[in-house]
């Protein structure tokens, strides 16, 4: 009897797998393998306003000094956002968590630099690096972990699929901030997408879950990658880092896990009542499968609540699909111009002109045409 085979990508996470000549999805012998994102660092001029939004979005203040705000989620772990006082609002960079302190020193030696002791709160050891895009990042280990807080949103009991699990009891989840549980991922734009992706694979041991390419440009290679940590047989988030080719070097968005759809939706209503700017949602993504809801903070940074995301171990091969606005979600409202940042500003036009004039990057005129097609498909 012949057992029929099944393509691993059919109904799993993408339309198709790799073909001969596609770029590799992981390095054979990386310097280290990071385990997760530790935190994201920002600078903002008004820490009070930043903290107000943070609490309404569902963060908890872990610590605050005269010039720095440390935010955390409810699950055990390190603080997940650091906001320092600065003259203007800007994204500084991500910090990745290494398996141990020895890995931090190994990475420092490979980069011909030195590791150093991190200040409180948290302590630990870190090394500062610069990726090929020019984005600064930090790799840390030995940072003190905060205990789980007794404020996780209550798990709801559902009557679904004909199963009667709740009797003589109502379902009344409160309209309150969706309590952030943990940091999930960050999305960055690069003019040197392939060089940067190679660097993250070779230095940090990250592996690609899904590749996307501009319409009609599969032969030119990918222009976006959803990248996860390689934890061996232990499942990791579908993407801890996502990178996309574009005319700039910048932060796109970051995502924070909440308990479930009810928490996400009730939190969405709470943010609307408090007159924050909604960007897009609620819906379910394709790459990563997570339920999502996107918001702009008072400084314009895009932040996402998500729940029910894919978890892959290191046996899943990457998927390949065409990038288009219409396939950003399985269901939900149409993607907005705000989310796509489809309202060209003088700064954006200047950025494109500068990128096209720079012969050392990957954002060419052909890539610009491909990017323009994404919004039309």
Image (cartoon, rainbow, N blue to C red):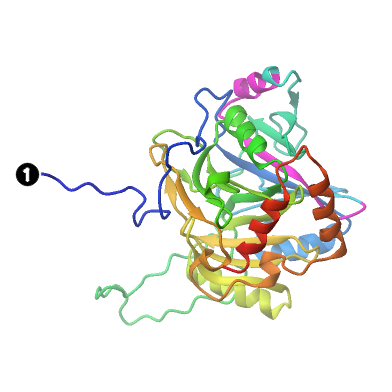
Compared with residue 329, is residue 369 higher up or lower down, i.e. above or below? above
Q: Nearer the viewer, residue 168 or 15?
A: 15
Residue 314 quadrant = top left
**Residue corresponding to mark 1:** 1
Q: Position of residue 371 (x, y in %)?
A: 66, 58
Residue drawn at x 65%, y 24% is 104
Tell me the element at label 1: loop
Q: Residue furthest right?
A: 87
Q: Is residue 334 left or right of residue 60?
A: left
Q: Quadrant of the C terminus?
A: bottom right
Is residue 287 something one can see in this rendering? yes
Q: Is residue 9 left or right of residue 187?
A: left
Q: Position of residue 256 (x, y in %)?
A: 60, 56
Q: Nearer the viewer, residue 148 or 324?
A: 324
Whether 246 is among the magenta residues is no
Residue drawn at x 79%, y 60% is 50
Q: Nearer the viewer, residue 342 or 264?
A: 342
Q: Position of residue 261 (x, y in %)?
A: 48, 69
Whether 99 is among the magenta residues is yes
Range of magenta residues? 87-108
Compared with residue 42, is residue 303 higher up or lower down, i.e. above or below? below
Q: Nearer the viewer, residue 314 or 169?
A: 314
Q: Position of residue 73 (x, y in %)?
A: 61, 53
Q: Is residue 321 left or right of residue 197?
A: left
Q: Callout 1: few (<14), some (14-19), or many (20+) C-alpha neighbours within 10 Å? A: few
Q: Residue furthest left?
A: 1
Residue drawn at x 42%, y 45% is 312
Q: Quadrant of the N terminus?
A: top left
């Amino acid at each position: 009897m012949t057992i029929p085979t099944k393509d691993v990508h059919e109904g799993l996470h993408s339309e198709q797998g790799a073909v001969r000549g596609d770029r590799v999805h992981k390095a054979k012998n990386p310097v280290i393998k990071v385990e997760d994102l530790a935190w994201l660092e920002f600078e903002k001029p008004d820490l009070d306003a930043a903290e107000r939004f943070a609490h309404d979005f569902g963060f908890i203040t872990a610590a605050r000094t005269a010039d720095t705000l440390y935010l955390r989620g409810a699950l055990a772990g390190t603080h997940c956002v650091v906001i320092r006082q600065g003259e203007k609002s800007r994204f500084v960079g991500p910090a990745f968590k290494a398996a141990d302190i020895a890995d931090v020193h190994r990475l420092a030696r490979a980069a011909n630099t030195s590791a150093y002791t991190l200040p409180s709160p948290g302590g630990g050891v870190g090394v500062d690096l610069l990726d090929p895009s020019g984005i600064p990042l930090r790799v840390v280990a030995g940072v003190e972990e905060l205990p789980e807080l007794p404020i996780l949103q209550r798990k709801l009991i559902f009557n679904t699929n004909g199963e009667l699990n709740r009797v003589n009891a109502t379902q009344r989840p409160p309209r309150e901030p969706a309590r952030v549980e943990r940091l999930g991922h960050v999305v960055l734009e690069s003019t040197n997408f392939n060089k940067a992706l190679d660097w993250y694979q070779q230095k940090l041991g990250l592996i690609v879950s899904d590749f996307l390419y501009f319409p009609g440009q599969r032969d030119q290679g990918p222009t976006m990658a959803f990248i996860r940590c390689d934890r061996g047989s232990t499942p990791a988030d579908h993407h801890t880092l996502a990178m996309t080719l574009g005319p700039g070097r910048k932060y796109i968005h970051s995502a924070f896990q909440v308990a479930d759809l009810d928490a996400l939706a009730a939190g969405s209503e709470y943010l609307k009542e408090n007159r924050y700017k909604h960007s897009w949602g609620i819906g379910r993504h394709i790459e990563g499968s997570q339920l999502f809801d996107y918001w702009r903070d008072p400084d314009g940074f895009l932040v996402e609540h998500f729940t029910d995301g894919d978890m892959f171990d290191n046996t899943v091969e990457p998927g390949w699909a065409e990038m288009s606005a219409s396939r950003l979600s399985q269901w939900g409202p149409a993607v907005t111009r705000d989310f796509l940042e489809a309202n060209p500003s003088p700064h954006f036009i200047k950025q494109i002109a500068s990128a096209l004039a720079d012969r050392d990057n990957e954002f060419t005129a052909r890539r610009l045409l491909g990017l323009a097609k994404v919004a039309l498909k």
